[in-house]
């Protein structure tokens, strides 16, 4: 297990007040987990359930420990080392390592943001008779307005409860009355195939569940919280108390468990409805909404749209801000959400450019559901090398002090690294062959 850092003076009472007690922590953890199920994730899981049915349910329990360990490692880098992920990589590795990894993560954030804006446009298109590009441009403008004129916290307060519309999928899965034996078999018996179609979906699920934007954001938010407490220098932020580490671990467990359950029930509900009806190719948000319609009636499209839009407005600012964190930290420049735009022009300028590029990509006319799946594949390729570096950094006593990884964390982390590398290499092999 991780040991306490000897140089830390714990501010445990302040930490407890900031976190707001157990009930607030539980609520925050659930919403964080829901934000991980962004439109890209929803599109990927819907496609997986429709194409492979209940035989793909095993992916959820396999991914749960992987989801936990990558987010926990990133949180620990921010909390213990006191810098964001790519600032830590810059301190530890030469430019020949830093720049390719950062470029991959940056590109993944841009593509993911574009795909998620497209998902928002497709979902709102079920309700609003406007062209999708107009809706996407409007959504991008709304996100930018809150980031520049208000705050991400305000945006999160407005939209976070919409993410609970994701609970429509567990309800639909239960009401569909799937065969318990088939559900159990699909959950505990991995039905692995070694063809390009299956492996592409596997890599997409891994990529969207372990997206680089999630743990890039997580590491930086640990730093932002400490800056908000008045710890503005790197030296002040180094180390963490037992209570801070325990609170971080609890948040990660709750959030990833909720996110994983939503993943499971999306595959279960679409596998029971769409796959069983022979609808294995999902080309539109309307088809995805059909997974709920037999059970929820005409209200299915409203439930589906609310879930996609809610988590979309949570996730897109995280992706665009995450890209800005990646860029400024890679080149050694400051950037923080605690600063005003006039105080961090490069940081906020990067957010603006990334958002405009993400909006512009939606004018190329790609299919939104396929784009959501392919964005997961792109993330899947960027995850293994970045996770490898995270494992090396969190085992390094020079960076972590006595918080270097314990045996369980090391086992889960290296296993996750190996699995992500293997899945990606298998997919590449099928393309070549």
Image (cartoon, grey):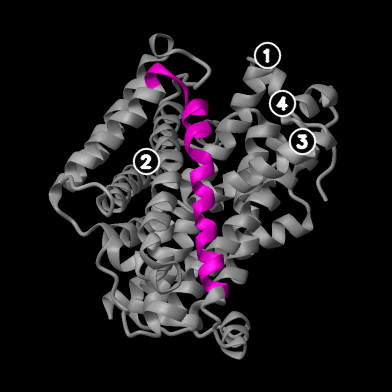
Q: In the image, what residue occupies the spot 48% across and 63% down? A: 206
Number of residues whose C-alpha sits closer than 10 Å to that of mark 1, classed few (under 14), some (14–19) or many (20 or more): few
User: Mark 2 highlights which residue?
Assistant: 106
Left or right: where 369 falls relative to 130: right
Q: Secondary structure at mark 1?
A: loop
On the image, the x and y values in percent for residue 266 come to 49, 67
Give whichever of 159, 337 is nearer the camera.
159
Q: Earlier in the sequence, mark 4 or mark 1?
A: 1
Give the Cα separation between the discs numbered 2 and 3: 29 Å
Number of residues whose C-alpha sits closer than 10 Å to that of mark 4, classed few (under 14), some (14–19) or many (20 or more): many
Give the Cα separation between the discs numbered 4 and 1: 13 Å
The label nearer to you, 2 versus 3, is 2
Q: Earlier in the sequence, mark 4 or mark 3?
A: 4
On the image, the x and y values in percent for residue 431 come to 28, 75
Disc number at residue 238?
4
- From what the image shows, is residue 121 above or below residue 201? above
| First to last magenta residue range | 148-174
The label nearer to you, 3 versus 1, is 1
Residues under numbered marks 2 and 4 in contact, where contact means CB atoms less than 8 Å apart: no
- From what the image shows, is residue 166 above or below residue 350? below
User: Mark 1 highlights which residue?
Assistant: 230
Q: In the image, what residue occupies the spot 63% across and 82% down? A: 188
Q: Residue furthest front?
A: 298
**Where, by quadrant of the figure, is residue 74 drawn?**
top right
Residues under numbered marks 3 and 1 in contact, where contact means CB atoms less than 8 Å apart: no
Q: In which quadrant will I find the C terminus?
A: bottom left
- From what the image shows, is residue 236 above or below residue 3? above
């Amino acid at each position: 297990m991780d040991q306490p850092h000897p140089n830390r003076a714990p501010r445990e009472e302040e930490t407890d007040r900031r976190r707001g007690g157990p009930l607030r922590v539980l609520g925050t953890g659930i919403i964080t987990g829901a934000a991980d199920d962004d439109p890209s994730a929803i599109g990927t899981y819907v496609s997986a359930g429709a194409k492979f049915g209940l035989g793909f349910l095993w992916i959820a329990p396999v991914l749960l420990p992987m989801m936990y360990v990558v987010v926990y490692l990133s949180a620990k880098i921010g909390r213990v080392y006191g810098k964001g992920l790519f600032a830590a990589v810059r301190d530890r590795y030469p430019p020949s390592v830093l720049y390719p990894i950062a470029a991959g993560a940056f590109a993944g954030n841009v593509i993911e943001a574009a795909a998620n804006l497209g998902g928002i446009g497709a979902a709102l298109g079920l309700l609003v008779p406007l062209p999708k590009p107009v809706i996407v441009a409007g959504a991008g403008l709304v996100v930018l307005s809150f980031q520049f004129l208000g705050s991400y916290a305000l945006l999160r307060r407005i939209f976070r409860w919409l993410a609970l519309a994701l609970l429509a999928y567990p309800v639909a899965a239960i009401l569909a009355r799937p065969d318990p034996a088939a559900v159990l078999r699909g959950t505990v018996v991995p039905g692995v195939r070694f063809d390009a179609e299956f492996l592409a979906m596997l890599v997409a699920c891994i990529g969207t569940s372990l997206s680089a934007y999630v743990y890039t954001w997580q590491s930086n938010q640990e730093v932002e919280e400490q800056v908000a407490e008045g710890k503005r220098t790197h030296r002040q932020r180094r180390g963490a108390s037992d209570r801070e580490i325990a609170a971080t671990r609890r948040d990660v467990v709750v959030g990833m468990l909720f996110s994983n359950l939503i993943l499971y029930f999306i595959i279960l509900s679409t596998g029971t409805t769409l796959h069983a009806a022979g609808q294995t190719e999902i080309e539109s948000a309307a088809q995805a909404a059909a997974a709920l319609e037999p059970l929820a009636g005409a209200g299915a499209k409203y439930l589906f749209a609310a879930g996609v839009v809610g988590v979309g407005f949570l996730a897109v600012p995280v992706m665009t801000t995450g890209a800005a964190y990646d860029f400024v930290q890679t080149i050694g420049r400051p950037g923080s959400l605690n600063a005003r735009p006039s105080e961090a022009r490069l940081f906020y300028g990067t957010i603006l450019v990334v958002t405009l590029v993400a909006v512009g990509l939606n004018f190329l006319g790609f299919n939104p559901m396929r784009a959501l799946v392919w964005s997961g594949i792109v993330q899947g390729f960027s995850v293994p090398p970045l996770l490898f570096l995270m494992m090396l950094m969190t085992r390094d006593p020079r960076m972590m002090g006595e918080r270097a990884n314990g045996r369980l964390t090391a086992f889960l982390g290296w296993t996750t690294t190996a699995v992500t590398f293997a899945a990606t290499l298998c997919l590449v092999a099928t393309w070549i062959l």
